[in-house]
Amino acid sequence: MLHGPTPGPVDDDDLADAYPWPDTTERPYVRAMMVSTLDGAAAGDDGLSGSVSGGADRAVLRAVRRFADVVLVGGGTMKAEGYGPLRARDEDAARREQQGQAKAPVLAVVSGSLALPLGEGSFADSDVTPIVFTTEKADPTKVDDARKRVQVVQLPGERVDAATVIDQLHRKGLGRIVCEGGPGLLNQVTDAGLLDEADITVSPMLVGTEKTPDTPMLKDPTKFELQHVLTAEEFLMLRYTKADPSKQQGDDQ
Ligand SMILES: NC(=O)c1ccc[n+]([C@@H]2O[C@H](COP(=O)([O-])OP(=O)(O)OC[C@H]3O[C@@H](n4cnc5c(N)ncnc54)[C@H](OP(=O)(O)O)[C@@H]3O)[C@@H](O)[C@H]2O)c1
């Protein structure tokens, strides 16, 4: 750790402690987990984040998931990345149960089309049945098919409302939410004012941004405060938390 509460070495076992979860009884806590190249790309020439990621980045991703309630992703990411099953290590499952959590984090996917790899990996073999949020307009045949494998939540409107997704997860007792993207879904969560923390890995590469989806401008710029900087393998793992708005107002005056 270069900057943060305890500068010095952080081993894999201590990594989860560097990403603490607050009490989420009253409100959910949403952290973004993303990797970006030096030129702001979220994906390499294969259109995947793995080609711009590395071992250190993946270690942080695993550490953050260990005591999360939910891994939230958009349908685009689910299709592109081919997520593996979400499972807990035995020692983590025991600690999670003591803390009143499910055995492992649940995968939650936001998708209008329901064109998802429902028979594979994370959908088929996770410890906890995944949840798919879609709309009432979704193709009924696809909804029926999806219900055979996952829990389907249909919400009103043309698109799934990100704020409703976060609220419904919290009501299910799933308040520790790690949003792993993609940029599209993360943009919606941030625009709804619901992003509490941005855990961004800076990858030591320049690749161009052609394979990185554009996102709309946010209604309000969201400011963050730096909590720590970890470094390994030329990567920087940054932990930012949302700046206190009252402090921001003071800064702006
Ligand atoms: N660098 C990183 O850390 C990182 C992380 C994740 C992803 N990525 C990369 O980013 C790219 C994908 O980005 P993206 O922004 O397109 O991904 P995304 O947000 O995961 O997916 C967008 C798609 O998800 C569904 N979706 C999202 N929000 C929705 C809503 N409110 N209502 C209904 N459906 C909704 C829609 O597809 P359907 O309706 O067809 O499901 C939409 O086209 C991939 O190249 C991936 O590899 C990078």
Image: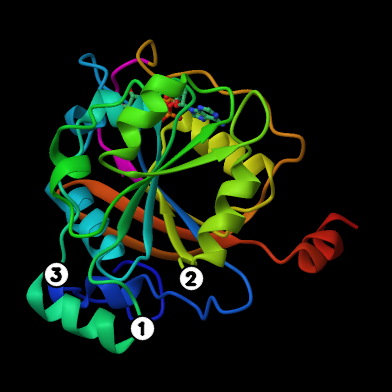
Q: Pick whichever of labels 3 and 1 is earlier in the sequence.
A: 3
> Bounds of the magenta span?
201-208
Residue at the extreme left: 90
Q: Is residue 73 above or below residue 9?
A: above
Q: Quadrant of the C terminus?
A: bottom right
Q: Quadrant of the N terminus?
A: bottom left
Q: Residue 95: horizontal and vertical position, in percent? A: 23, 84
Residue at the extreme right: 253
Please name the residue shown 77% across and 62% down the image.
245
Amino acid identity at mark 3: Asp
Residue 40 colored in magenta in the image: no
Q: Main secondary structure of the magenta part?
A: loop
Q: Residue 147: horizontal and vertical position, in percent? A: 34, 38
Q: Is residue 93 visible?
A: yes
Q: Quadrant of residue 37?
A: top left
Instruction: Say left or right for 12 vs 131.
Output: left
Q: How is the image coloured?
A: rainbow
Where is mark 3, residue-wise?
A: 12
Instruction: Say left or right for 90 vs 126.
Output: left
Q: Is residue 29 visible?
A: no
Where is mark 1, residue-wise?
A: 100
Whether the residue carrying mark 1 lies under 8 Å from ligand 1 is answered with no
Instruction: Say left or right for 164 vs 68.
Output: right
Please name the residue shown 78% across and 60% down the image.
248
Residue at the extreme bottom: 98
Amino acid identity at mark 2: Gly
Foreground: 170 or 60? 170
Amino acid identity at mark 1: Gly
Q: Is residue 34 above or below residue 170?
A: above
Helix, strand or loop under label 1: loop
> Are discs 2 and 1 less than 8 Å apart at CB?
yes
Give the CA distance from mark 3 to mark 2: 28 Å
